[in-house]
Image: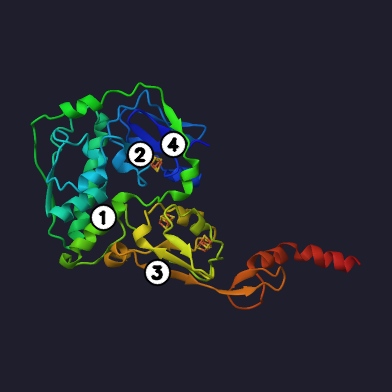
Amino acid sequence: MLYKQQGELFSYDLLKCLRTDYFHNDCQSCLDICPENAFYFDRKRLTVDFDKCTNCSVCLGVCPTEALELDFFDPNDYVLKNEPLLSCKKDIPCLSAFSSEHFIAMALRQGQIDVDLSHCEDCHLNPEGKTLASIQKRIEEARTFLAETGSEATIGEASFSDDRRGFFKAIFKTAKEVTKEESISDAKSDIDRLPMRQTLLKNSLKLASKDLPNKEVSTSYSFLANKQIDAMSCTNCGDCVQFCPTDALFFSSDGAAIWFVAGRCIDCAICNDICKPRSISDKERIDLVSFAFDRGEELVHHTIEICSECKTPFPYKGGEMICERCKQFVDEFGDIFKLASDME
Ligand code: SF4
Ligand code: SF4
Ligand code: SF4
């Protein structure tokens, strides 16, 4: 299988995309925002039409896993440049390359940043106002988060008109070259899917933590989640652990407990969706110190016993020493066995 779709300057890494590992994930943020309609589904597989892609960067900031990359602009590197004014007339292709986490990280590191949205309304990358609305939503989310933490960092607005896009215009040429796809299947195990923007956000919070009056915040933000597991209904099946794209959920070494690291969770909700008994759910609040320092929390700890019927280990909840599968089997087919023995 080919795992990377590579254009001249833009690439889509299927290994990082949420749709690849968990078939039922319905993320299509990139497809929804692309002003050139360059994404499409080919037999349910997300695909890039590199004849349409203009390397504009608009989709970069909306992908939760950084599966989309440009060769000539990395929003994570840009955060470290400590630029106080973000403008597409300076050295950024489009402000939509940044996520809420990027805006927060830049504001926390610098105390104040300004965004230049004065050119967005008439921009060709803003069909039906979609791109501007999305950028504004991310900036507003960043502002709300900063306000809730009590941070004094601010995100203001400013206008910049000295057009230095010549440098970028040379690069923005429409990619008409033949699309290349390269196989990186051997590298699959080496991939850490935790987006770099999350690490930048955590590091920025660590730097600012002593100045933040409120260290516990709501999990209503698109990039924050906190989890809990109901011990009585959890069957310890491990589906949530197996399908978590960032290893935010993992088993203890003896397999009896499930742990969670909020600092590795990207709030994709795959675990909630895949859990058949609906045992895993979201908590409403999160401690930012635990988030920033990757502190783990044990969500559930089962007592493991051996099933008296099938002799396999199972999470014991009291009563008979029989696992859920055998119990269900007896419930469903018990009558048939009784009928057979009555006939003998
Ligand atoms: S936004 Fe990212 S994770 Fe979502 S479908 Fe596009 S590439 Fe995949
Ligand atoms: S929380 Fe749900 S998916 Fe995870 S181990 Fe328990 S039952 Fe399975
Ligand atoms: S813990 Fe759940 S919501 Fe968080 S990254 Fe893993 S699967 Fe997604």
The front one of 39 and 83 is 83
Q: Amino acid at mark 2?
A: Leu
Residue 121 screen position, x and y as percent: 18, 32
Q: How is the image coloured?
A: rainbow
The amino acid beneath tag 4 is Lys
> Is 270 on the left or on the right of 318, as rendered?
left
Badge 2 is on which residue? 68
User: Marks 4 and 3, Cα distance to the nearest angstrom?
Assistant: 35 Å
- Any mark on residue 297, and which? 3
Coordinates of residue 230 in the picture (x, y in percent): 48, 68
Which mark is on residue 201? 1
Residue at figure coordinates x 45%, y 33% from the top left: 182
Residue underneath mark 4: 4
Disc 2 Cβ-to-ligand 1 distance below 8 Å: yes
Q: Is the residue under label 1 in contact with that under label 3 (CB below 8 Å)? A: no
Q: Amino acid at mark 1?
A: Leu
* Residue 139 % position (x, y): 21, 47
Instruction: Name the mark nearer the viewer: 1 or 4.
Output: 4
Could you say whether the residue bearing mark 4 is in a helix, strand or loop? strand
The answer for how far apart the CA atoms under marks 1 and 4 are is 27 Å
